[in-house]
Image (cartoon, coloured by chain):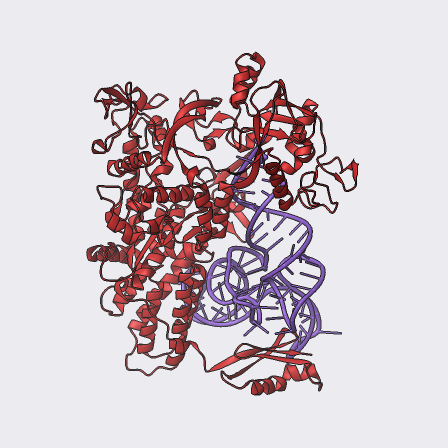
Chain colours: A red, B purple
Amino acid sequence: MAGYDPTTIEPKWQSAWEAAGSFRATREGDKPKYYVLEMFPYPSGRIHIGHVRNYTMGDVIARYKRATGHNVLHPMGFDAFGMPAENAAMASGGHPKTWTYDNIDTMVAQMKPLGFSLDWSRMFATCDPEYYGQQQALFLDFLEAGLVYRRNAVVNWDPVDMTVLANEQVIDGKGWRSGAEVERRELTQWFFKITDFSEELLEAIDGLDDWPAKVKLMQANWIGKSRGIEIPFERTDGGDPIVCYSTRPDTMRGATFLALSPEHPVARALAEDNADLADFIAETRKMDTTEAAMEKAEKKGIDTGFTVRHPVIPGAEMPVWIGNFVLMEYGTGAIYGCPAHDQRDLDFARKYGLEVRHAFHMPGDETVVTDTALVPDKSETVAYVDHFAGIGEVTSQAGIDASIDWFEAEGLGEGQVKYRLRDWGLSRQRYWGCPIPVVHCETCGVVPEKKENLPIELPEDIDISIPGNPLDRHPTWRNCICPKCGGPALRETDTMDTFVDSSWYFARFTAPHAETPTDPGEAAYWMNVDQYIGGIEHAILHLLYSRFFARAMHITGHLPETAIEPFDALFTQGMVTHAIYVTRDEQDRPVYHFPEDVEVHESGARLGATGEEVEIIPSAKMSKSKKNVVDPVNIITRYGADTARWFVLSDSPPERDVEWTAAGAEAAYKHLGRVWMLCDRIGGMDRAAPGEGDDELLRAMHKTIFDVTGGIESFGFNAAIAKLYAFTNTLSKSKASYGAQRQAILTLAQLMSPMTPHLAEDIWAHQGSEGLIVDAPWPVADESLLIEDSVTLPIQINGKRRSEITVARDLPKEEVEKLALADDSVARALDGAAPKKLIVVPGRIVNVVI
RNA sequence: GCGGGCGUGGUGGAACGGUAGACACAAGCGACUUAAAAUCGCUAGGGCAUGGCCCGUGCGGGUUCGACUCCCGCCGCCCGCACCA
């Protein structure tokens, strides 16, 4: 036989699985179900090595669960709407649809050789009318249930591309594509009422036991619950009071001014007959809203000229300003400034010469205030006096709560719980997205489309060569009949945020061709996703939106109540990284080189062509511009899918980044070749020859079954693989009989089969086993063989290992003590004296304290 | 600023509070070979007075018979959030 040849065996076994329909998800028998899902990819053009790692992890789980007697659902699809398709079409003159579907074809063709146990019959792309039509049906149900509404909202508007931009698409205040200065513009937009679920989404995080703590924390922070108080400030000119929200009413005595958001109704009203104010407000509209820019942005304000009364200091008046740093979206859009206890307020006060007054004083002496620096938020040793509750620890949560109670009791304000979470604006002025299924009728207003008219399909004859939304300027697409009055009407031309598409695809996979968004029976059977796997970058938005959608879909009857938390367990995997090779040009600018152009030696790295020395930046995120990318297709061509799968799971824990190295991939390939040769050697053994060490080999085998099973169950793939290496080494050195070695190699193949399924099948067949390895039940460790008859006990002297003794497992403690004290090292250390203490942990360790 | 995580050989990393460095990469030595590659075997945390002893998981303390692991305080790196009142 020739050596290990993945190019032959991999297609062979993939065909065998396909012919047998091995991975079709069925509801057969009374097997428990298991739904494993990896976050579906965006069809960018080619698969990435990160996809390989993500899907390999899911595949290990899926194959393992299948072997342990589960009906497994393991589907794949494409998150296929989005801007890149439009940009590619604009750049190349093609059509977004063509570009997207061509990419999907390419990526499917690249994924299939990896041998994932996917049920390809369930595949869909979110840009399929069959899918987005059902999404439109969902939208209409949400609308009817009051989960969607329309209102004016301020958005990032690119005046050149004539579209709304997401915050991430605004760079240094300019549109990422057009380079135009982004404006803040008010548009009528559709919103999901996710804020109705703020408390529920927050509270339910506690129940997500199999989610990473980090993700749960990020979600909790994103929802951002805070307890505070709304306090009305009375205007001295008799106008309506201005309500401010504060989480720190204990600092009220230090309040010296009010600041309104430029979008605050009072500010707007004033701007109508005050040109300076109007200019100021217009100016802030142009302001960049990205984090980085906000941080740098100067705090600016303008005095409105009117004042309010201080609620707790009789006779005191406070000027009212408009400040560019006050957000309309949070609280009431109005704050009181307390410069003595807030850095931002202090900056503002200093800039405009506003008063700085302390809120707290020392006990018994009202004239001595604390240091003029800010009162620290952490507990100071000084006991400040709280004017409202009279307690010492002003800055403690108890102090804040007490002050809220005090304000309420005095009738000066009302306690409020606020959330940072805002409603989810879903309108996008883009072509390549799911059309929002409503029409605008002159007589009836905004009218939902009839369900029987769904899907509202995107027109294909569009002009995408000029900026703006092609749906808006399409000659006929907008024209339609009002579903209510039958008169002429116009379609909504906004499409949905692509996050909507990915917020329910997991439910659709349970019945991808149902004529309603879900099939209740299928959804009830397959939901929830038992194991969800994806990148940490989706820790907040995608997962939060999906949690909201599952709740909304329950309200509208599309998911059972048991599925309102759609993902039972979540695993966030690390990236695949690669070293960057860089040299410098004459101007000291970096020049990047592809890994294949660099020769890496012990002493350093040099360019193969010129011998020029190359700097190595290790473990960097793969990026085309840095030329440190590895194309999985090349890897598979060179080494086969099993090697790629084995390598991405080896060495690094799955939640951590793994660095792709050519040497590592080569080593994985060699190892699989060794296993294959081992199988070949065992196949050629003399079946009648007596062996030695059968018992030892089988004990090691059962230990390995136990360890690998535990490793897979706990996402310890790297540790499981290490155990498989160790067992392979044991087996290759074993002199056991043919029968024992055959049993060992078959078990090894089974244990490797989730990671390297093709090689495993080949070994299975080579050893003449019945059927396919994918249909073989997972091996079970014989617990009686896990316990050794004799154990080697380390002997510590004062907690440091000094010696060891091998004793029968059940040797009485007293006997162990005797043997330990008789040990050379112990005797030498004791030098005739008696030990102070002797600790014997049976089967574990002996510690002699001197 | 707020919140969270991580620091172990040349490298990736392993280790229910119980033999620190499993497994692998890179390295060295040896076998095979005319030779090289491949393959196989062996060595390998550091130090020293080397059949033995000392030190060692970022630093300093603590709990414990025993600490990479638990607690407290530092230092460094990484991530998330943030004009959120």
Residue A537: x and y in percent read 45, 43
**Residue at (58% x, 34% y) in the render:** A413
Q: Nearer the viewer, residue B71 or A94?
A: B71
**Residue at (70% x, 37% y) in the render:** A374
Is any part of residue A325 visible from this angle?
yes
Q: Is residue A27 left or right of residue B82?
A: left
| For residue A66, above or below residue A127 | below
Residue A224: x and y in percent read 51, 41
Q: Is residue A507 left or right of residue A359?
A: left
**Residue A270's image quarter?**
top right
Picture quarter with the C terminus of chain A: bottom right
**Residue A239's image quarter?**
top right
In the picture as drawn, the residue positioned furthest to the front comes out as A410
Q: Is residue B57 left or right of residue A97?
A: right
Q: Nearer the viewer, residue A282 or B33?
A: A282
Q: Nearer the viewer, residue A170 or A806?
A: A170
**Residue A687's image quarter?**
bottom left
Q: Nearer the viewer, residue A39 or A658?
A: A39
Residue A751: x and y in percent read 35, 65
